[in-house]
Image (spheres, rainbow, N blue to C red):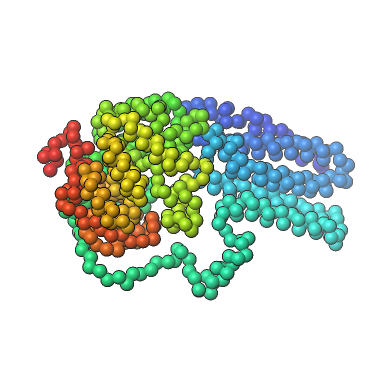
Amino acid sequence: MFKKPLLILGILGALLIIAGLIFNPSFLAKFAPAGKFRSGWTVAEIHLVQYYFIIFGIVLVIGSLIISRLPKEKRTSQYILGICVIGIVLTIAGVIFSPSFIEKNFSPIKFLEDHNIVTLIYLQLVTITLGCIIIFVSLLVYRKKFLNPSKKYSLFVLIIVLVLYFILLDATYIKIQYPNNTITKLNEYSKVIDLLLGKDILLSDFEPKSTLVVERKHITKAKYPVIDINFHLNSAFQTDEDRKVLAPENLVKSMDSVGLKIIVNTDGISGNLKQYAEKYPDRFINFSATWFPAMIMFDEELANLPNEMEKKVKMSCRGDGEIWKYLGLKTRDASGKVIPVDDPRLDPLWDKAAELDIPVLWHMGDPAGFFQPVNQFNERYEELRKMPDWSFYGPRFPSREEILKQRENVLRKHPKTIFIGCHMGFNPDNLEYVGYLLDTYPNYYVEMSTVLSDLGRQPFTARKFFIKYQDRILFASDGGNSFGEKGWTFEKYYRTYFEFLETDNEYFDYPLQGVVNQGNWKIYGINLPDEVLEKIYYLNAEKILYKNNLTKGEQQ
């Protein structure tokens, strides 16, 4: 009766051990396209499956051998205890294979993406929960079948299992996934009571309606033709409604209604994106960004980047960008080290841009709040609560200061290459520093997309800055998604930018406020002189985009 199942279990265990030993990352990499894995997460997944196979294979082999040597009358009880052992092993494995352990020991680059970490947290939760359930149920069955249920020590063991589970749940899940939880902070429960009694509200419910009555000048169309140097026709955040708005014919009509003359698409020309410039060649310009992924880039790929850039230019791309922020932050080489922005291996890429006479539009760094603790003192708390992957706080990431220093090194080393800092170079909250960069490096420009939340709360400083550096600032919106959400139509989105630049209106929403909460405040217009507006709207962009293609007169 028992021999056949035990034999099957033993064979199954042996097969699991053999599979775990054979199907390791180095073996499976032979079947990958490049003969090696680019993703540290893929390697970590293989290692995790491999070790689980080996561990449970050993348990099954040893367990079947032990039980087979016992008298037949004891085998049923030992089967139950054997299942309990499986639960114990599962629980221990769940504790050991924590996200930090897997990141450090199973990933070749010692780094995993935040969403991978979250996946591992849930996997650990499921593993420990399943293990504890197996332990509890097997002990419960054993207690009823083979022990006197009235004996206190057997009940005490079950209680210990439950207590142990909740301790592990708190240590491996609650404290990691919800570090600011108040479950164990008794003094915080008064806040919960206030919330239940209606004496307080959640921050997410706070939407005050201003009673301020001020005159407001409405802008329906920009005073001069506008070139938007940073627009995403293939944004990752697009909805079906966005795609309707951005269909070529609909988009051109909307552009005409607000005075938007040219869109620079920074998502390349793959798929349907090339149709825009083909159908409306005088309304769309394509940039194609050099790819820096949140994973491994091999040396041969880095060496080939200048060739790829040249190919894209030959395919009608007029600039490189938006180069994504993962360079200097997440992209790693085969050794597992983050590739710094000023890595010498990238010098040929920046030199190639100068040789081809194209600008490099780069998203370097991120808002200061993204590198700070996500707590009640962080201005971008609401935004980071909604998008936790945007937080780069802690030792897992290079510091913001380090990234900005590397960026400056590149500006210094490549004076013939035109670099455009997206979003005011992510220093809109420190315009003095932006001014220093513009004064020091004539090859550096900035664009103003998605930072009206910062610029508009310092209107006097911002106005002086825009006037002083009127030849170095480009108009950009970073548009391409969320059109229609909470009333933010394409037209309203652009008219808010124009309102900021052309009026001295007070206390109005920055673009996409309520959809993307970059700060819980309103903004003020800076009412720029006409000669400054003209440069920012299109002349500065023409100077960069058309110097070797069309004269200013031909464009106009």
Q: Position of residue 526 (x, y in %)?
A: 24, 56
Q: Nearer the viewer, residue 458 or 212?
A: 458
Q: Residue drawn at (44%, 33%), measured in percent from left and top? A: 339
Q: Position of residue 485 (x, y in %)?
A: 35, 59
Q: Position of residue 198 (x, y in %)?
A: 50, 74
Q: Residue drawn at (52%, 70%), measured in percent from left and top? A: 195
Going by the image, does 479 lie left or right of 261?
A: right
Residue 113 appears in the rendering: yes
Q: Quadrant of the C terminus?
A: top left
Please tell me whether residue 343 is drawn above or below residue 517 in the rendered image.
above
Residue 293 appears in the rendering: no
Q: Residue drawn at (84%, 44%), measured in percent from left and top? A: 75
Q: Nearer the viewer, residue 26 or 540?
A: 540
Q: Residue drawn at (61%, 38%), measured in percent from left and top? A: 48
Q: Quadrant of the N terminus?
A: top right
Going by the image, does 78 lie left or right of 516?
A: right
Please tell me whether residue 529 is drawn above or below residue 417 in the rendered image.
below
| Residue 191 location, quadrant | bottom right
Q: Residue furthest left?
A: 553
The count of marks equals 0
Going by the image, does 223 lie left or right of 157?
A: left
Q: Nearer the viewer, residue 33 or 548?
A: 548
Q: Position of residue 97 (x, y in %)?
A: 63, 42
Q: Nearer the viewer, residue 14 or 280?
A: 280
